[in-house]
Image: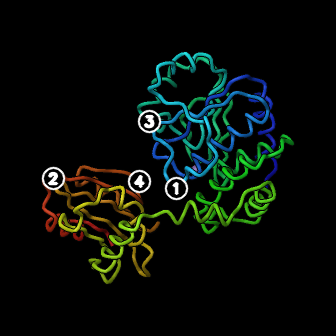
Amino acid sequence: MNNRLYAQLADAWKALSSVTSVLISAHIDPDGDSIGSSLGLLHLLREQGIKAHILQHHPIPKNLSFLPHDHAFLSYDQPDIKEIIAGTDAWCILDLNAPQRLGPNILPFFEHFTGKVFLFDHHVNPILKADHSHVIIESSSTCEIIARMALESNIEINAQSAECLYTGIMTDTGGFRHSRTNAEVMRLAATLIDAGADPVKIYDRVMNAQSLSSMQLLGMALSNLTISHDGALILMILRKEQLVGYSSEDLEGFVNYTLSIEGAKIGGLITEWEDGTVKMSLRSKPTHEVRSIAESFGGGGHVQAAGARVRHGNLKEIVESIQQLAKI
Ligand SMILES: [Mn+2]
């Protein structure tokens, strides 16, 4: 571990723990790391007698609501929110690199905030301006940064905080499987387990939370894959009669299965909805790209993860176009 990377965090904690009230926000579409780091930091601050609350665009997802969060969340539409923010000394922004990622319900408050801003993140190219910026791209997760800040500052990590921080490290490393998984991360996870995080319970609550109907729909989708280009392009297609009674929330994560098939380079989930909209969610291996395909349908995204929605689209024609546009 490069200790120099994390030694600076003791100064951040010193500055942060000298205030009386802190607001914490992370990115829209919350995940294990954004929720885990927000709650992990909240419990560290509250242990020190500092007032701390979380303000975010979306509510806590169902599979993370087991994490201790009593009186943690404020609502952006509660009548006294402006006064609360005006009385806050420091705003900690976690797990995001651009202010827009706070979401439209939070951004206007943030733009008018006059207190100190702290940024803790592990994404590249931070464009959010902060008084105290701690962007450590070598970190597995923002939860790792918060945990190391506590350890560098000789602050005891209480059981509530440990449970939240372990959760984000687990989810951002794909269950200790992705590239940032190393001996140091495993040692940190062990430290959090010693502090009270239960790895078996956390995995079960976070990962085994799919609804039965969602799993049944996945089964149907997997048994009807459309395969072309010698197995390099794999499309999961769901027609409107197959989607009766389902919403796009039920399809969370489906597209990832297309790339887990041996030989797949580009994968996609193409769905046709009752109102005539055809949606596509595309993924590729690092050797390939899908953004240009999404852009040709008026969508966009990242090089390896992009999407588009076509109003009044013809499913058959759209599938054929994707097969022609895919650069394999
Ligand atoms: Mn993260």
Q: Is mark 4 on a helix, strand or loop?
A: loop
Q: Which residue is drawn at 18% across and 70% down?
A: 320
Closest to the observer, 29 or 95: 29
Q: Which amino acid does label 3 sit on?
A: Gly
> Please, is residue 25 above or below residue 66 in the view?
above
Q: Which residue is drawn at 69% across and 53% down?
A: 163
Give the residue type that dot 4 points to.
His
Residue shown at 52%/55% (left/top)? 63
Residue bearing mark 3: 103
Q: How crowded is mark 3: few (under 14 residues within 10 Å), some or many (20 or more)?
A: some
Q: Which of 44 and 34 is in front in this view?
A: 44
Dot placed on the residue nearer the N-terminal end, 3 or 1: 1
- Tell me whether circle 3 and circle 2 mark residues in contact (CB < 8 Å): no
The amino acid type found where label 2 is placed reads: Asp
Which residue is labeled 2 in the image?
A: 275
Q: Can you identify the residue that label 4 sits on?
A: 302
Quickly name the residue at label 1: 63
- In space, the residues marked 3 and 1 are separated at their CA atoms by 21 Å
- Does mark 1's beta carbon lie closer than 8 Å to ligand 1? no
Left or right: 146, with 319 as reference point: right
The x and y percentages for residue 127 are: 53, 35
Compute the Cα span from label 4 to label 1: 26 Å
Look at label 1 and name its amino acid.
Answer: Asn
